Amino acid sequence: MNSVPPLYPILYDDLVRATLREDLGAAGDLTSDAVIPSGQTARTVIAARQDGRIAGLDIAIHAFRTLDPQVRVTVALQDGSDAPAGASLATIDGLARQMLSAERTALNLLGRLCGVATATRSLVRLVEGTGAAIACTRKTTPGLRTLEKYAVRVGGGMNHRFGLDDAVLMKDNHIAAVGSLTDAVARVRASVGHLVKIQVEVDTLEQLAELLQTRADAVLLDNFKPADLREAVKMIAGRMIVEASGGITKDTIRAVAETGVDLISVGALTHSASVLDVGLDFALT
């Protein structure tokens, strides 16, 4: 099991509450309130309908607990576990109305995060033994970045920067705005603090040669073919962190990893991961 420290509830409480409010609207759960007596209790089992890496179980449970603070929860598989289809993840005992009202919010978030973790796990396994790490990008679902990046870690991957404010990533448009890669790096180095890392995206080996004369900390080799990646790694010779990115798929990622790069960033981990099928088995008690 991949053990990643759980997120503090304060990091997802507002999101869970907003999602519940979106679902409940102005009148609440018309269906559950009409057919289930107040005070009726139930037991729900959260179950995996397909194989996958579990991520976000605490967040799903938080949705149930928000509507019924007295729910009793027994967790069978923790985040980071690989669950086979049909496996029970957790059992929840509490008020039936509230349980059904929280169901969709819980499953939407859990299925999404399990999908991201499972997609990450798949790529991590494909590069095992190469020394390359798999990283995500900022191509996240609006409002879910903290949770999706957590799911990447649960899947065995690494996080790239979380936002525009925690690291510098200079792309072609930034360089074009200055007119010179060298001048752009010098300008940003003079502007940011000593703890801020500077990464620069390059498209050619010629740009890389220029970058190696600057005070950048890392390079992003964008859409390089494996042969050029090998040459780039040789040129860099350990002087900066080397990241490959751009159009990398499960069919090509092993070849990329074997070139000696340190990181491979894949936007599809968050922008295109399939939702893992999870469901509830519900019974009145």
Image (tube, grey):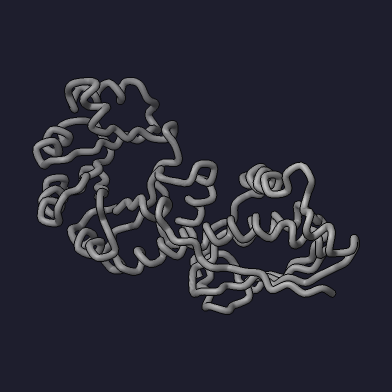
Residue 128 x, y percent position in the rendering = 31, 68
Q: Is residue 158 something one can see in this rendering?
A: no
Figure disc tally = 0
Quarter that holds the C terminus: bottom right
Residue 163 x, y percent position in the rendering = 44, 37
Whether residue 181 sits left or right of residue 283 in the image: it is left
Whether residue 159 sits left or right of residue 222 in the image: it is right
Who is closer to the viewer here, 185 or 45? 45
Residue 9 x, y percent position in the rendering = 66, 49
Question: In which image quadrant can residue 216 be found?
Answer: top left
- Residue drawn at x 83%, y 64% is 35
Residue 58 x, y percent position in the rendering = 64, 59
From what the image shows, is residue 162 above or below residue 136? above
Question: In which image quadrant can residue 200 be found?
Answer: top left
- Residue drawn at x 22%, y 62% is 252
- Residue drawn at x 77%, y 74% is 283
- Residue drawn at x 24%, y 38% is 201
Q: Is residue 225 something one can see in this rendering?
A: yes
Who is closer to the viewer here, 137 or 231? 137
Who is closer to the viewer here, 181 or 112? 112
From what the image shows, is residue 254 above or below residue 9? below
Whether residue 115 sits left or right of residue 61 in the image: it is left
Whether residue 245 sits left or right of residue 224 in the image: it is right
